[in-house]
Image (tube, helix red, strand yellow):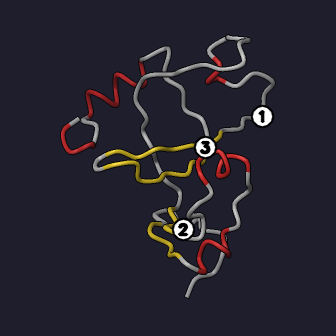
Amino acid sequence: MPGFHPDPDVLASLQQDPHARHVPAWMYVQTAADGTVSFVGASRVDRPVHPLRYGSDRTHQLIVGELIVRPHYVIGTDVLRGHGLGGLATQGPDLASYLTDGELILDPYCRFPLATD
């Protein structure tokens, strides 16, 4: 994936991969080191068993693979500084608060739910 953009062959192989999953998701990303980020997030679907469970009843799963992100919108903020990844995972998003010390970075599909000046 040169330049972190998948070429058509990679995208075609994803469509044919029986283990690939397309699910809605949200995540927080924070810098961990040069060239490295940590992230935490969640995904919810309207069915009893989430596709990312891969049929397992175990409490936790380590999934090693690739992550392709198609952002609906991205907010950069310093409001969450000091919360830690565990704190971020357990709180709900307060978009208006995030903008008090942040900015809307990306909204390619015009889905950001608040008015911005």
Label 2 vs 3, first from the N-terminus: 3
Q: Which residue occupies the extreme front position in the image?
A: 82
Q: Is residue 94 above or below residue 87?
A: below
Q: Nearer the viewer, residue 62 or 56?
A: 62
According to the image, label 2 marks what residue?
110
Left or right, 8 with respect to 103, comes to left
Residue 46, numbered circle: 1
**Badges 1 and 2: C-beta atoms under 8 Å apart?**
no
Label 1 vs 2, first from the N-terminus: 1
Q: Crowding near pointer 3: few (<14 within 10 Å), some, many (20+)?
A: some
Residue type highlighted by circle 3? Gly
Residue that appears at 54% across and 32% down: 22
The CA span between labels 1 and 2 is 24 Å
According to the image, label 3 marks what residue?
41
Residue that appears at 67% across and 75% down: 96
Residue type highlighted by circle 2? Cys
Q: Crowding near pointer 1: few (<14 within 10 Å), some, many (20+)?
A: few
Q: Crowding near pointer 2: few (<14 within 10 Å), some, many (20+)?
A: few
> Looking at the rendering, in which quadrant would you find the N terminus?
top left
Q: Can you give x and y, in whole percent of width and height, for residue 50 in the image? A: 70, 25
Q: Can you give x and y, in whole percent of width and height, for residue 83 in the image? A: 62, 57
